[in-house]
Amino acid sequence: MIDVLLPVLGRPRSAQPVVDSIHAATTVSCCITFLCSPGDDRELQACLDTHADVIRVNWHPGPGDYAKKINGGIVETKMPWILMGADDLEFEEGWDVEALAEAERTNKRVIATNDMANPEVMRGRHATHPLVARSYIEAHGTIDGKGFYHEGYDHQCVDVEATETAQARGEFSFAARSIVRHLHPVFNRQVKMDDTYKKGMARGQQDIALLRERRPLWNPNYRSRRR
């Protein structure tokens, strides 16, 4: 029922723990798919060793790598629901049941899981790692293209655009009891900053500028509010 997509880069130590966490906490049927970069050989082998599905993409990691991997994984998978995942997540038992129950209760197709880290997520206003109905992606895509994430950002703000777009379409809801912890050094001092995190944060200002430029596509009143 759920495809869990895991774009990865240069963090082979995290492959088995995230798979173990998913298996231990998930009740409904799910398929785990890693999306690896060419040349990232230790990561690729670590992912293969988990016995999850592995896709090696045909581009080298650069701007938009996370969004491209997620969008590529959507095309290559088939389950009706998709978790936009990562390898720094820790799943709590029932995360899947709670998210699907929220979707059924509200009839929404973009369900924010609770990452127990980002304050906006915990307020029910944002999604870092949402569970998304494939039918939503097929019906809508991004605000001006295919896939779920806009690939023009370097890394940051892809989740902001996707969340705000879903909200503008009336398709967003928050499953507070669907716990998918985000173990990120910005929110957790026990997590070590590494090269992959540094890469993702390097062009934050450019990503914010692009978000502001694109925001009127789904929020026509945005510019008037900034004056």
Image: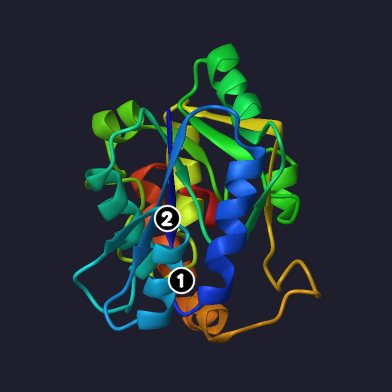
Mark 2 residue crowding within 10 angstroms, few (<14) / some (14–19) / many (20+): few
**Image x and y of residue 44, in percent:** 37, 72
Label 1 – label 2 distance at C-alpha: 9 Å
The amino acid at mark 1 is: Ala
Q: Residue at x 47, y 27 (%)?
A: 171
Nearest the camera: 74 or 63? 74
> On the rendered structure, is 213 left or right of 117?
left
Kindly identify which residue carries mark 1: 46
The amino acid at mark 2 is: His
Where 13 sits versus 211, above or below?
below
Image quadrant containing the N terminus: top left
Nearest the camera: 213 or 96? 96
SS under mark 2: loop
**Image x and y of residue 102, in percent:** 61, 21
> On the rendered structure, is 12 left or right of 64?
right
SS under mark 1: helix
Nearest the camera: 48 or 227? 48
Residue 221 in view: no
Indicate which disc, 1 or 2, sits on the residue closer to the N terminus: 1
Residue 91 in view: yes
Nearest the camera: 206 or 126? 126
Q: Residue at x 67, y 67 (%)?
A: 184
Kindly identify which residue carries mark 2: 51
